[in-house]
Image: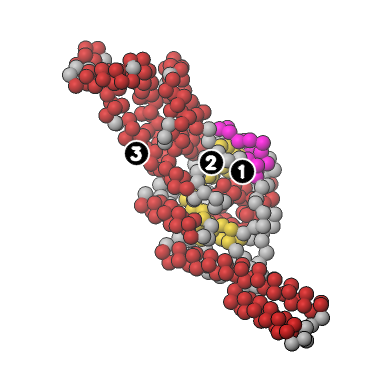
Amino acid sequence: MSAAPGSAPSGAAGPVLDVDALLDDRSTSVLVCCGSGGVGKTTTAAALAVRAAERGRRVVVLTIDPARRLAQSLGLAELDNTPRRVEGVGAAAGGSLDAMMLDMKRTFDDVVEAAASPERARAIFDNPFYEAMSSSFSGTSEYMAMEKLGQLRARASVPGGDGSEPWDLVVVDTPPSRSALDFLDAPRRLSSFLDGRFIRLLLAPARAGGRAYVRVLSGAVSSVTGALSRILGAQFLDDLQSFVTGLDAVFGGFRDRAERTYAMLAGPGTAFLVVATPDEDALREAAYFVERLGADGMPLAGLVLNRVQTTALPRLSAERSWAAVVHLEGRTADDEEDGTAPEALSRGEHALAAGLLRLHAARMFRLEREQELAARFGREHPGVAVAQVPARPRDVHDLEGLRAVGDDLGGA
């Protein structure tokens, strides 16, 4: 699908973002796309991955969004926790492209198997609490996103390496809305969870051991666990206690890795791109992302302003178009009233011209509003570089469409 015809609006939200320079920079090994829902973030991530691969990078794109759009646009039947090669992309330039979707439970299973003995891993898997926590516990998806990103980054070749590892660029497509940045909180939230009073209480017997077990459970502690047993049931509490005890060492290792991954995200090898459309709500969310990334010290590369209106007649403003409509319709009405109505063909031409001018006026009103919003964003965030992608008449759903978006991002 080719780019939409016409000129991009002259108003800009900030300095121009050089996307190709970003993709060609071999010191950049992680590119994170974030933004609110419905702004084309998944398409942008896929287009960036395709363009990077076709410029010689060895790329893996990871989506945390469970929608199937990425698989469909890349021509794959499905995506799962295993990277799948996208054939026909990048080979001519020495690059490659793999794609995958985060499987939260499978990643959790991998963490347990890597950190625990086979016997302990089996005990954890068999515990009734594991299924709930590994698939639906609040925050688990963010923890596992950090884990998977850390795994992919660990497998990627480092700048200056021999290139023997499978990838040198990881592109991450995050979930919609503000939850896209929740994985930045994963180490802190995990530490808070593990250090909470209730968890320490459940872990106390195993950590104390022997006669100390009796001392730990004496007094206030034994009264609390007794009360919990009466409320929740002894078997329930035993299952929960054994589950938390079994995960203690596993989570400890994950906490360390999550903190290392967080440090990697803040390091010089990572770049964040905020994706938005030129409407008020999306740019408000984009401002939140920009400010949050700045507060966390994360390296922001810039803003992708997606689905920007264009026009082939930038000098014909909305006001001039509407004035011409009024003139044409007024002239036709006057001619009909004084009996000097033009011939049928001429009336048809007037109607057609007025209709086209109406459409142009509506587009220009929207374009000018977008310019105003983009300019306001630029004034509020003057240092944020911007790449603009023109609006298209249809959704992008294949590799050619992704290449066209990539061309727009690269300024081709």
Q: Give yes or no for residue 89 being in the magenta stretch.
A: no
Q: Is residue 351 left or right of residue 244?
A: right
Task: Kindly state the secondary structure of the residue where label 1 is placed.
Answer: helix
Highlighted range, magenta:
69-86
Residue 110, x across and y down, in percent: 49, 26
| x 57%, y 69%: residue | 365
Residue occupying image coordinates x 81% and y 77%: 344
Which of 313/258 is in front? Answer: 313
Quadrant of the image occupied by residue 200: top left
Label 3, residues with CA under 10 Å away: few <14, some 14-19, many ≥20:
few
What residue sits right under mark 3 in the picture? 188
Element under label 3?
Answer: helix
Residue designated by label 2: 65
User: What secondary structure predominates along the stretch shown in magenta?
Assistant: loop
**Residue appearing at x 62%, y 54% in the figure:** 406
CB-based contact (under 8 Å), mark 1 and mark 2: yes
Residue flagged by tag 3: what amino acid is it?
Arg
Alpha carbon distance from label 1 to label 2: 9 Å
Name the residue type under label 2: Asp
Cα gap from disc 1 to disc 3, whole angstroms = 32 Å
Which quadrant: the N terminus? bottom right
**Can residue 79 be found in the magenta stretch?**
yes
The residue that label 1 is drawn on is 69
Q: Amino acid at mark 1?
A: Arg
Which residue shows up at 58% across the image and 77% down it? 319
Which label's residue is closer to the chain start, 1 or 3? Answer: 1
Q: Please identify the quadrant where the C terminus is shown.
A: bottom right
